[in-house]
Amino acid sequence: MDELNKIDDFIYRSLMDLLFNMAPECQGIFKLEYNFPGGVYLFMNEFASFLSSEIEKDPTSAIVNKSFAFINKVGKSNNLEVINILKVGILEILYTSKNIDRKLVSDALSQKLQRYFHEFSRSYY
């Protein structure tokens, strides 16, 4: 079981490092050192909630643009666990955010991720 935890930890660290490298502002906001309670899914949920509030404030801000660059880069992965983290941890949160325009979010996503984003319309109205 310890070996499987190492895989989870590797994915968590890799995604967090990528986010902090692409959007250094996030590191100051989350102030984490690989110890976010609840693991990578909860961390990505918190990131998506943060991004949602930033989109509400200014959808053209640098942090919003950097965040979507991060999301689209992660979306290039062929690792099913990473894609699931992206779908459940970020895209679903953005889809269900009440105060942001879904078209704006969709337009900022790669074609591959737009497909996943629009799949939520089957579950949410």
Image (cartoon, rainbow, N blue to C red):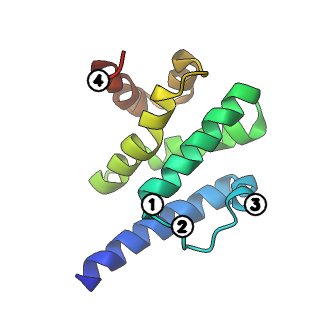
Which comes before the other along the chain, label 4 or label 3? 3
Per the model, the C-alpha gap separating discs 3 and 2 is 14 Å
Residue 69 lies in quadrant: top right
Per the model, the C-alpha gap separating discs 1 and 4 is 23 Å
In the depicted view, which residue is nearer to us: 55 or 17? 55
Image coordinates of residue 109 in percent, x first then y, are 51, 30
Q: Which residue is mark 3?
A: 28
Quarter the C terminus occupies: top left
Could you tell me the amino acid type at mark 4?
Ser
| Mark closer to the observer (2, 1) | 2
* Residue 86 falls left or right of residue 57: left
Could you tell me the amino acid type at mark 2?
Phe
Residues at circles 2 and 1 in contact by the CB criterion of under 8 Å: yes
Quarter the N terminus occupies: bottom left
Q: Which residue is mark 2?
A: 36
Say what secondary structure mark 4 lies in. loop
Say what secondary structure mark 1 lies in. helix
